[in-house]
Amino acid sequence: MQIKDRPEYTRKASVMTFTPDETVLTAVQAMSEKNYGAAVVISPDRKPIGIVTERDFMRRLLSKGLDPNTTPVSAIMTSDLKLAKGDDNLVDWLRQMSNDRFRHLPVVDDDGTLIGIMSQGDFVSYTWPELIDRVKDKARATFGVNPSIFFGLAVFVVIALTGIFALLLTK
């Protein structure tokens, strides 16, 4: 599946952006107000030059005692960006995000202009149903039973064990 095929690709709110010279305080206030975990730092022609995240605020600002009133976002942004295109394979990017330990992926057009951002959560919402289907298929192949029976039994076992542990902990 391509990134552009995800509903989140077209339904997401616009990307929050900042210029490199805007202060960290401005970014923190805007991101807090909108509950954004990341914003893209862009050049005048809307090309991504960095990303600033909540983690950057903690590691590159607060831990170093910098003043958010005077520190520009360019001083704390992550500038080693990974950039995707809408035609890129979703699972390939999810794997790379997991391996390289980053959670936000700016999406650009063929000219490198910012058009969106996808989060690891956007990708995971796609993979969970696929994983559940694979587990059902594996259960059917392994146990020769309807997967719903297998899952029902598994739920019963989990509830029973939870009850047993609860009883043991109260004694």
Image: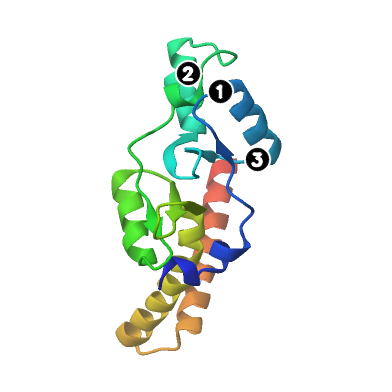
Eye-nearest disc, 3 or 1: 1
Q: CA distance from mark 2 to mark 3?
A: 19 Å
Query: Is residue 117 among the parts visible in the rendering?
Result: no
SS for dot 3: loop
Indicate the amino acid at tag 2.
Leu
Query: With respect to residue 90, does 145 lie above or below?
Result: below
SS for dot 1: helix
Considering the image in quadrants, where does the N terminus appear?
A: bottom left
Could you classify mark 1 by the number of other residues whose Cα lies within 10 Å: few (under 14), some (14-19), or many (20 or more)?
many
- Tell me which residue sits at (35%, 67%) in the image: 89
Residue that carries the numbered disc 2 in the rendered image: 61
Contact flag, marks 1 and 2 (Cβ < 8 Å): yes
Could you say where residue 96 lies in the image, as x and y percent from the top left?
30, 53
Report whether 144 appears left or right of 127: left
Residue that carries the numbered disc 3 in the rendered image: 35
Report whether 13 appears left or right of 122: right
Residue that carries the numbered disc 1 in the rendered image: 24
Query: With respect to residue 134, does 64 lie above or below?
Result: above
